[in-house]
């Protein structure tokens, strides 16, 4: 089985990050990744038809060569992600500010010998009252938020950089340096911002990445929008120091009301189109400075939803000139990284690879996220014209393709080209081809 040429051409543009033999094996694995039912390395090479048959001398590589792509080959996952960003994502954005999303996600695993596994919070099984822990890998993901022409009202997050978080107990046991999730996030931000010092970035993250450990270590060309505690201490800018004053200069000015107290005062009402619906809210805004980051002015927005059933929340942006509407709409686009995590798990088997060594663990599962990015980019630039919306009379509200539709389009086009390359001839050949294509299209 081979992927359609428009997609393999996309892969060829990033082939410079690997040697040619490694890239050939990587292409085979990506092909199998698209078609395999279970995303293990052996499952991928079976789906790609790359199994070496000793009896008939078919195939050119032993199956261990494909395992070595992730476990031993000399290539960098960061370089691959940056190459995808440079070659494909930057042209989609143009000269505008690049929006980033930060989040962490859990990949459930089994076994004690797999590198980096530990007990982590499981957000899907946990409730507000009960926190549930699960065994697996915790990945910190950095993605680029884009809006594509065929979906003008929806944002897509395209993951490009990844870090495996190892909890303190596991790190101490393996004698590894312990690094928190915010530290890993800052590391990825610095790598991307250093590679593009002439571009402006703006990251969006939940409250786990909105603390002082991130806020005080942001790259110079990167801003941040995140959640803020309702009782956070806010301060005005320090007053100008008068000549002849003794003592050290003041770091903070007068105390400002907390976000919760801001809503108890007079607030304006605003209607926003976010999260796919129109929401009315009471909003109070101010410019203040956090206690642990007094040198950076923040635009603080406190929100009391009047519709939708959500609780009172507060947000901040490191761009003090932003409007309240801009801050809230920007933060709402963070949901796209949740959709990317879910699609990679559901449709691309993010949790299924069975590698256990360090390199295999750190490179196999993130490849599913990079494949998600490549498929979305391919669909936006080359595959959208071949998309045909499926006939679903009972689902009239769907007007835009989902990632499942993009993946099905890639599969069906690849199968179509494979069938047509057989060059069947003779009486009834067209009917045979059409029957096969219809059957395979339903299967895709």
Image: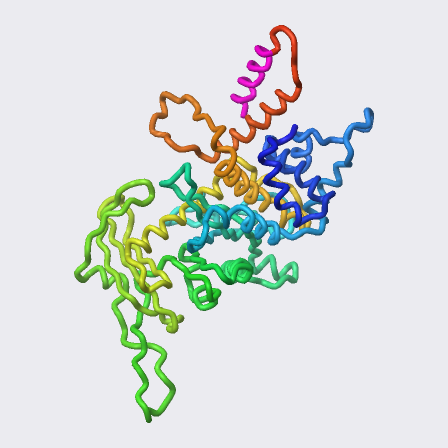
From the image, which quarter does the C terminus lie in? Answer: top right
Q: Is residue 433 covered in magenta?
A: yes
Q: In this view, does 286 lie to the left or right of 48?
A: left
Count numbered badges in the picture: 0
What's the magenta bit mostly, secondary-structure-wise?
Answer: helix
The residue sitting at 63% across, 24% down in the picture is 418
In the image, the segment drawn in magenta is: 430-444
Residue 187 image-quadrant placement: bottom right
Q: Which x, y percent locates residue 156?
A: 44, 43
The residue sitting at 63% across, 61% down in the picture is 176
Outermost residue to the top: 427
Q: Which x, y percent locates residue 398?
A: 37, 30
Residue 414 image-quadrant placement: top right
The residue sitting at 63% across, 34% down in the picture is 31
Outermost residue to the left: 266
Q: In this view, does 126 lie above or below 432?
A: below
Q: How is the image coloured?
A: rainbow
Q: Is residue 290 covered in magenta?
A: no
Residue toward you, 13 or 269: 13
Q: Which x, y percent locates residue 337?
A: 45, 47
Q: In this view, does 55 lie to the left or right of 76?
A: right
Q: Which x, y percent locates residue 25?
A: 70, 40
Q: Is residue 58 above or below residue 302?
A: above
């Amino acid at each position: 089985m081979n992927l359609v040429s428009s997609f393999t051409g996309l892969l060829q543009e990033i082939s410079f990050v690997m040697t040619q033999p490694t890239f050939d094996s990587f292409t085979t694995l990506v092909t199998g990744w698209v078609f395999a039912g279970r995303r293990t390395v052996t499952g991928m090479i079976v789906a790609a038809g790359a199994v070496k048959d000793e009896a008939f001398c078919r195939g050119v590589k032993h199956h261990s060569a494909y395992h070595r792509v992730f476990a031993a080959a000399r290539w960098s996952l960061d370089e691959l992600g940056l190459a995808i960003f440079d070659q494909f994502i930057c042209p989609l954005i143009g000269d505008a500010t690049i929006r980033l999303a930060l989040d962490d996600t859990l990949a459930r695993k089994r076994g004690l010998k797999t590198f980096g596994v530990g007990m982590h919070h499981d957000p899907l099984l946990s409730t507000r009252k009960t926190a549930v822990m699960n065994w697996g890998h915790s990945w910190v993901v950095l993605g680029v938020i884009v809006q594509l022409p065929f979906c003008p009202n929806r944002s897509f997050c395209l993951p490009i950089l990844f870090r495996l978080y190892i909890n303190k107990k596991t790190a101490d046991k393996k004698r590894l340096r312990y690094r928190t999730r915010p530290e890993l996030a800052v590391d990825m931000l610095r790598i991307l911002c250093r590679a593009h010092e002439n571009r402006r970035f703006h990251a969006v993250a939940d409250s786990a990445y909105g603390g002082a450990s991130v806020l005080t270590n942001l790259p110079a060309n990167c801003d941040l929008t995140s959640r803020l505690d309702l009782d956070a201490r806010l301060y005005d800018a320090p007053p100008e120091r008068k000549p002849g004053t003794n003592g050290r200069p003041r770091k903070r000015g007068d105390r400002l009301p907390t976000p919760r107290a801001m809503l108890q005062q007079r607030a304006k009402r605003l209607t926003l189109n976010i999260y796919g619906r129109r929401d009315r809210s009471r909003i109070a805004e101010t410019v203040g400075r956090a206690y642990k980051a007094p040198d950076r002015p923040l635009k603080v927005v406190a929100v009391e939803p009047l519709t939708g059933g959500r609780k009172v929340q507060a947000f901040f942006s490191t761009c003090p000139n932003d409007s309240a509407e801009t801050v809230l709409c920007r933060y709402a686009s963070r949901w796209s990284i949740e959709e990317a995590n879910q699609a990679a798990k559901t449709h691309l088997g993010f949790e299924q690879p069975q590698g256990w060594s360090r390199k295999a663990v750190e490179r196999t599962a993130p490849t599913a996220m990079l494949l998600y990015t490549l498929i979305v980019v391919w669909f936006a630039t080359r595959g959208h014209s071949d998309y045909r919306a499926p006939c679903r009379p009972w689902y009239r509200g769907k007007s835009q393709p989902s990632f499942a539709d993009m993946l099905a389009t890639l599969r069906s086009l690849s199968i179509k080209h494979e069938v047509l390359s057989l060059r069947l001839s003779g009486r009834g050949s067209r009917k045979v081809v059409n029957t096969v294509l219809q059957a395979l299209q339903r299967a895709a």
